[in-house]
Image: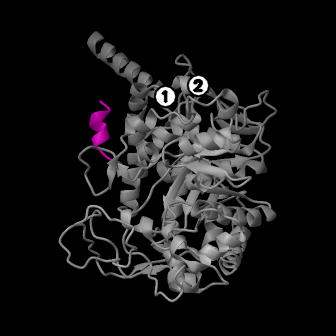
Amino acid sequence: MKKIIFLFLSIAFCLNLSAQEVNIIPQPVKLEINPKTSPFKIDNRTQIIAPDSLINSISYLQDYLSKYYGITITRDSTSNKVSNIIKLGISNVKTTKPDYYELTSDNKQIQILSSSSKGIFYGIQTLIQLLPYSRKAFPVQVPSVNITDYPRFDYRGMHLDVSRHFFDVAFVKQYIDYLALHKMNYFHWHLTDDHGWRIEIKKYPKLAEIGAWRNGSIIGLWPGKGNENIKYQILPKEIKITPKDAVIKTDGIRYGGFYTQEQIKDVINYASKKYITIIPEIEMPAHSMAILAAYPELGTEPDKKYEVAETWGMMNKYNNVLQPSEKTFQFLEDILTEVMNLFPSQYIHIGGDEGSKVWWRKSEVSQQIMKANGLKDESELQSYFIRRMEKFVNSKGKTIIGWNEILQGGLAPNAVVMSWQGEKGGIDAAKLQHKAIMTPEIKMYFNHAQFVKEDSLTANKFSPLIDVYNYEPVPAELTPEQAKYIWGAQGCLWSEYITNPAKAEYMLFPRLDALSEILWSPKEKRNYPDFLKRLKTQFKRYDLMGITYSKRYLITSE
């Protein structure tokens, strides 16, 4: 009998320890667990006490509990209940930290306080990670904790390329949900590129009718072998493609799609309820083959029949660019006017990367424009182009973001630099007292392989989880004053080899977890072995949510 009692107590003790274990990503600023206090239990009698102004957080929690545990909880803004409640409140907390929140829980109630509705929402994301990761868990218990939390960086971004491969509205919303779960606050929506124009522009309908569709997609990695039909023989002599025996093979299947303006509005509204700002990207002056296919008169070879690009990789760095003429500027201003009327974001990304100067060098019109404006080379013409567009965007009360190539020939006065070719662009921008977003390709491009021997086709580069986690967005060479201009960092998911939502999830997770922690948590709290321990629990939550991720991390995190 004593053995049975001892066994029962041992099991109960182990279960209590398991219930008290807390594994949160990103790691909160301060976390205290109160093991002597019994957990809070959520059931259909639990009530949310919160004002109407917090409806986004209220609805998010109600939906999550209903979807994953079958629990329906009601809300009352005036109830005097003091037990079995989840209380959300706006409070004048004494802190200068933006998006600060406090979460406390005991056996009677859970309380989340913040000076902003956004802070409350971030507290809800933490609360979700205190919940069990099994649908069979009943009652649903929350351990007794005291949490104080706020983000390290103001810009916590994630990008999605929908040009190489198109993702429907349902998945874009799901992607936004993933960002919200990780306390990200910016979604960089890469809407246009050589391979497809993905946003309806009412003044220029051919962008969707023609530019949104290509006649095939590359097969396998570039360069490939086995196809005698080498494309793009029209490349200028001074451009040398390596390796010299490279050939390209495409599938010949028509591919494309675009979002209507009503769909765009729907997604923007959806993201706003998750406190995520969507930054649209309209590429210029390069990565514009989809534009030129629809409106060839805007290219440097106006009599040429352009096509929406079917290939990616090295060859696309040499695709044609927009002619920097008044006609082109008017066209782009019309497009950006519609875009800015759709997107409430303060920031508009205009690309500016990988513009091959050879086309401007070969164009008599471009050379005349350079001469008329006193520009000594094509790099200054690039700067002239970007400054013209920035002036227009600024006139509408908005700010441009560009890839680090916008530094060429002189940085536009108010531009934000997104540094992808290493850190130099971000460092140079910070030293010029411009905001910089760090997204160095070798660490922050999640289309790269996660493992040396990857399970599926990826870009032929390597960005393992540990490298993402150990990345420090603030370069050591910056002074404390200069470091203030490092606005934050961003992960990028380019879709050359990502053709469906499951593959997107596989490439995203768990590198998004690592990114969220380097952007949210205090630098001094970063600890990779501890992160891997917490990641095991996160994987179980992903199983609950039906999210695809690489099972190999279950082995490597042991």
Residue 286 picture location, percent across and down: 53, 68
Q: Residue at x 77, y 61 (%)?
A: 394
Q: Looking at numbered disc 2 in the image, what kind of residue is underneath it?
A: Val
Residue designated by label 2: 145
Q: Which mark is residue 11?
A: none
Q: Residue at x 30, y 38 (%)?
A: 554
Q: Looking at numbered disc 1 in the image, what kind of residue is underneath it?
A: Val
Q: Secondary structure at mark 2?
A: strand
Magenta-span inclusion, residue 552? yes
Crowd around label 1: few <14 · some 14–19 · many ≥20 (10 Å): some
Q: Secondary structure at mark 1?
A: loop
Which quadrant does the C terminus fall into? Answer: top left
**Part of the protein shown in magenta:** 550-558
| Residue nearest the viewer, comparing 175 with 140 | 175
Give the Cα separation between the discs numbered 1 and 2: 9 Å
Residue 499 shows up from this direction: no
User: How many labels, in total?
Assistant: 2
Mark 1 touching mark 2, by CB under 8 A? Answer: yes
Which quarter of the figure has residue 463? top left
Residue designated by label 1: 22
Which quarter of the figure has residue 379? bottom right
Residue 153 picture location, percent across and down: 63, 37
